[in-house]
Amino acid sequence: KSFCIDNGFYRMRNSEEKITQAIDLYFSNLSSRKVRNHFRRHLPKNCSHVTILDWCRRYVLKVTKYVDTLQPQLSGQIYLDETEIDCEKRNDYFWASVDWGTRYIPVTSYTLTRGYDEAKEVFNQIKRKKVPKFIQTDAAMFYPKAFNKVFGQGKRKYDLRTEHKVINTLKTGKYNVRIESVFMKIKDRVDDFRGLKALYSAPILLAGIVLQHNFIEAHTTTGQIPSELAGLKLNIGVNRWLGLIKIATAQNKDLDENH
């Protein structure tokens, strides 16, 4: 009897080091073609830019399934906003919240429209993670109604654990700068994509950018990786994508067996 252990790279024709290097380069602002050209200059065996995109989508889905089961220790200082994303020459919307104490992004959402229903779903996701101390948003008219619906601060005001802070730029001249700084990095990456080409792929690639932010790169201000500040001490080594994929593969297999 013989068998092969699947550590996340079973039947892949390229080495795990090359695959994870491609993923890291891609989510570090190199296009798939530039990553391909980099390999052409340094390695004897090449891959196409389409293959690199396939690797990114494949492993982002695998890692996201595992990461969604984690329970980060958040500070409860949540900054929330949405931004337009160019996809198929159409403006879609990407919603993200950042926990300022850890710089961890706990909740994201990708939608085709922007309004009360979409904001309510994002608030529900935030509440399921952890009831925060406050949530700060801009003065878009759908935020207060959605917040009151989810956190129960209507006429009875029976749940006062979470405060809704609103930044009205027209009145104060101030901006929701802490979440905007996160969006600047995301939008810079999307601009490097020259827009997103397919609706099925767009949420996956944006999830990859968030994984890069949360688990791979040290934050420039804190000098630490957000996931570690949030108490997620994962033993994933120096090649963080490689370690994350191997842990995700093992944990996902256990989840599938238990179900």
Image: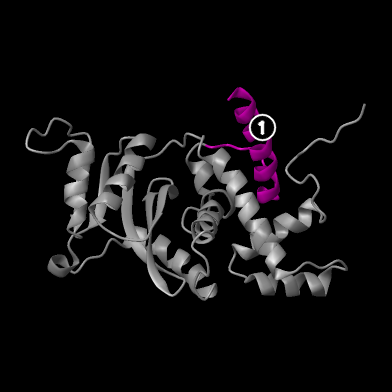
| Left or right of 33 on screen, residue 11 | right
Task: Name the residue: 57% across, 38% down.
Answer: 66
**Residue 245 percent across, percent down from the top left:** 67, 44
**Residue 204 percent across, percent down from the top left:** 53, 55
Residue at label 1?
253
Front residue of this view, candidates 6 and 112:
112
| Left or right of 61 on screen, residue 75 | left
Task: Name the residue: 56% across, 41% down.
Answer: 65
Q: Is residue 233 above or below residue 168?
A: above
**Residue 191 percent across, percent down from the top left:** 49, 74
Q: Is residue 254 above or below residue 143?
A: above
Element assignment for label 1: helix
| Residue interval drawn in magenta | 232-259
In the picture, which quadrant includes the N terminus? top right
Question: Which secondary structure class fits the magenta region best?
Answer: helix
Q: Quadrant of residue 83?
A: bottom left
Magenta stretch encompasses residue 240: yes
Magenta stretch encompasses residue 214: no
Q: Residues within 10 Å of mark 1 (few under 14, many from 20)?
A: few
Specify the farthest residue to the top. 258
